[in-house]
Image (cartoon, rainbow, N blue to C red):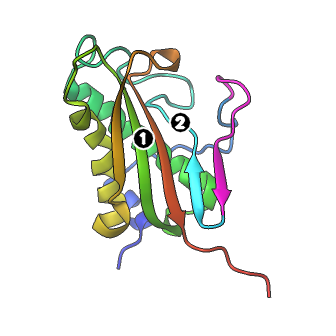
């Protein structure tokens, strides 16, 4: 059985390192993740690289096509893999993804939110496989996001239990 780290390498993903500079340095004092036992909750992730460059900023359906929104969501998921590594040490320490909240900046009445959010969900399935990579998801239309990002992802997942001292 191939692990998530091996699949990420096979896919040639450029996964960022969130150890330095610290997460949130552009957004103020925010917590990158919170772990409660075997539950890991990640702070909001965007299609913004460590240097602050954004992929497809703007409004999906106006400045950004659905295809570009999908690419932004996929890149956001890759960034999320970096945060998972930062929090857990390895993608192989993910037992199962649980829930994703996908925020898409769009005009009123924009309906293909799910087509944009699929960019993140598809990437997770490629990396974690059908069992661990399937998740519950809400795709929510938003009027704006920080720094004009077109997409933001909040993710909850189940971790492999930490070894107990004994």
Q: Is residue 10 visible?
A: no
Q: Residue at coordinates 35% horizontally, 47% vertically from top-left?
A: 137
Residue at disc 1, secondary structure? strand
Residue pictured at 41% horizontal, 46% vertical:
100
Examine the image and state in which quarter residue 60 appears: top left
Q: Residue at x 42, y 38 (%)?
A: 76
**Residue 53 place in picture, x, y as percent:** 49, 22
Q: Is residue 158 left or right of residue 62?
A: right
Relative image position of residue 127 (x, y in whole percent):
35, 59
Q: Position of residue 106 (x, y in %)?
A: 31, 18
Among the 4 quarters of the image, the one containing residue 8: bottom left
Q: Residues within 10 Å of mark 2 (few under 14, many from 20)?
A: many
Q: Quadrant of the N terminus?
A: bottom left
* Residue bounds of the magenta highlight: 25-36
* Total numbered labels placed on residues in the image: 2
Does residue 37 belong to the magenta stretch?
Answer: no
Quadrant of residue 130 within the rendered picture: bottom left
Residue 128: percent from the left, percent from the top? 37, 63
* Distance in Å between CA atoms under marks 1 and 2: 9 Å
Judge whether 100 appears above or below 127 on screen. Answer: above
**Which of pointers 1 and 2 lies earlier in the amino acid sequence?**
2
User: Which mark is drawn over residue 101?
Assistant: 1
Residue linked to disc 2? 44
Residue extending furthest toward the top: 62
The residue carrying pointer 1 sits among few (fewer than 14), some (14 to 19) or many (20 or more) residues within 10 Å by Cα, namely some
Disc 2, SS: loop
Task: Nearest to the eye among marks 1 and 2: give it.
Answer: 1
């Amino acid at each position: 059985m191939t692990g998530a780290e091996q699949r990420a390498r096979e896919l040639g993903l450029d996964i960022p390192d969130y150890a330095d500079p610290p997460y949130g340095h552009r957004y103020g004092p925010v917590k990158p993740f919170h772990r409660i036992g075997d539950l890991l909750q990640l702070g909001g992730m965007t299609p913004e690289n460590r240097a602050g460059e954004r992929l497809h900023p703007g409004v999906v359906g106006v400045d950004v096509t659905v295809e570009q929104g999908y690419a932004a969501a996929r890149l956001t998921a890759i960034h999320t893999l970096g945060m998972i590594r930062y929090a857990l040490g390895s993608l192989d320490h993910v037992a199962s993804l649980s829930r994703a909240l996908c925020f898409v900046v769009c005009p009123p009445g924009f309906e293909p939110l799910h087509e944009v959010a699929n960019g993140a969900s598809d990437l997770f399935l490629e990396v974690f496989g059908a069992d661990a990579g399937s998740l519950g998801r809400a795709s929510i239309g938003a009027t704006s996001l920080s720094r004009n990002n077109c997409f933001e992802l909040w993710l909850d997942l189940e971790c492999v239990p930490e070894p107990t001292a004994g």
